Amino acid sequence: MSCKIPKKPRPAFSPAGGCVIRINAEPYQNILDVCEATGRSIKDVSTRLIEYGLTHLEIVEPSKA
């Protein structure tokens, strides 16, 4: 199973490194729940989740409606 994300024009690029990523409230709370259950930091948990998601990512062309 993969996470499919359609392509679209990309906004300005920011350099790699530590940065702020904004997410919606519900996924943020889910991440905090994982932190509480595992005793790991939010940086550790969110990095692991993002790395996992990126390894299971499939970029697809947008569907024609």
Image: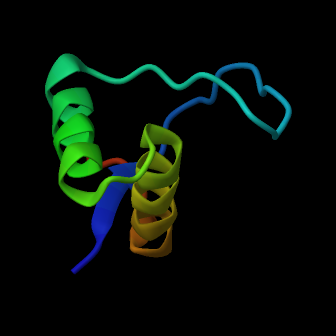
Looking at the rendering, in which quadrant would you find the N terminus?
bottom left
Relative to the observer, which residue lies in front, 63 or 28? Answer: 28
Specify whether residue 27 is in view.
Answer: yes
| Position of 52 relative to 44 (above/below) | below
| Position of 32 relative to 5 (above/below) | above
Query: Is 18 on the left-hand or right-hand side of 24?
Result: right
Relative to the observer, which residue lies in front, 54 or 8? Answer: 54
Specify whether residue 65 is in view.
Answer: no
Check the image and name the residue furthest to the right: 15
What residue appears at the point 49 percent right and 74 percent down from the top-left corner? 55
Q: How is the image coloured?
A: rainbow
What residue appears at the point 69 percent right and 27 percent down from the top-left corner? 19
Query: Is 60 on the left-hand or right-hand side of 9?
Result: left
Relative to the observer, which residue lies in front, 64 or 21? Answer: 21
What residue appears at the point 18 percent right and 54 percent down from the top-left corner? 37
| Position of 12 relative to 65 (above/below) | above
Rendering coords of residue 23 (x, y %): 35, 24
Query: Is 11 on the left-hand or right-hand side of 33?
Result: right
Q: Quadrant of residue 41?
A: top left
Rendering coords of residue 26 (x, y %): 14, 26
